[in-house]
Amino acid sequence: MAVAFDDVKVGDEIPSFSIQLDQMMLWMYSGASGDFNPIHNDKEFGEKVGLGGTIAHGLSSMGRMQKTVVDWIEDPGKLKKLKVRFAAPARPGDTVTFKGKVIDKKEEDGKKLVVLEVGAETQDGVQVLTKGEAVVQL
């Protein structure tokens, strides 16, 4: 059932989304995005440059954040803005949880907008995405 503006309250949390990353996901994202940087694909290279192995693409995390918001509103056309800060890398083996919380509701130019604070963290509490904001029109 679609989310209605009048039913949303400041402080509401949207359903979270969690995923456990594996190296195959990084390889697949490299193919889809065209980003073949060895820090995402070559464990030995990642270790050599001080990353401790491969790290996930930041934009793949942002894409999963977008999925989390869109799953809540059930219409990708209603997502009007999404911004995040890439705070720390996610790695194969990490379970990353994407979350959002309503921080404002407003009407501008006849549009009903909901503002969410969004972010993501690993199972160890490492903040992968911070200072995030999503604006949806309901």
Image (spheres, grey):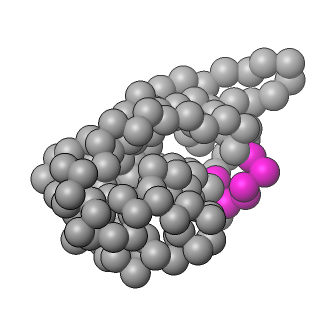
Percent position of residue 73, x then y = 64, 53
Q: Main structural element of the magenta stretch: helix, strand or loop?
A: helix
**In the image, what residue occupies the spot 23% across and 69% down?**
44
Q: Is residue 30 magenta?
A: no
Which residue lies most toward the right here? 110
Percent position of residue 127, x then y = 27, 41
Using the rendered view, name the quadrant where residue 47 is placed. bottom left
Residue in the foreground of this view, choosing between 50 and 101: 50
Residue 53 to residue 132: above or below: below
**In the image, what residue occupies the spot 20% across and 45% down?**
126
Q: Is residue 7 left or right of residue 122?
A: right
Residue 131 to residue 20: above or below: above
**The C terminus: image quadrant:** top right
Using the rendered view, name the quadrant where residue 72 is placed. bottom right
Residue in the foreground of this view, choosing between 134 and 108: 134
**In the image, what residue occupies the spot 72% across and 38% down?**
80
**In the image, what residue occupies the spot 49% across and 35% down?**
84
Magenta extent:
73-78
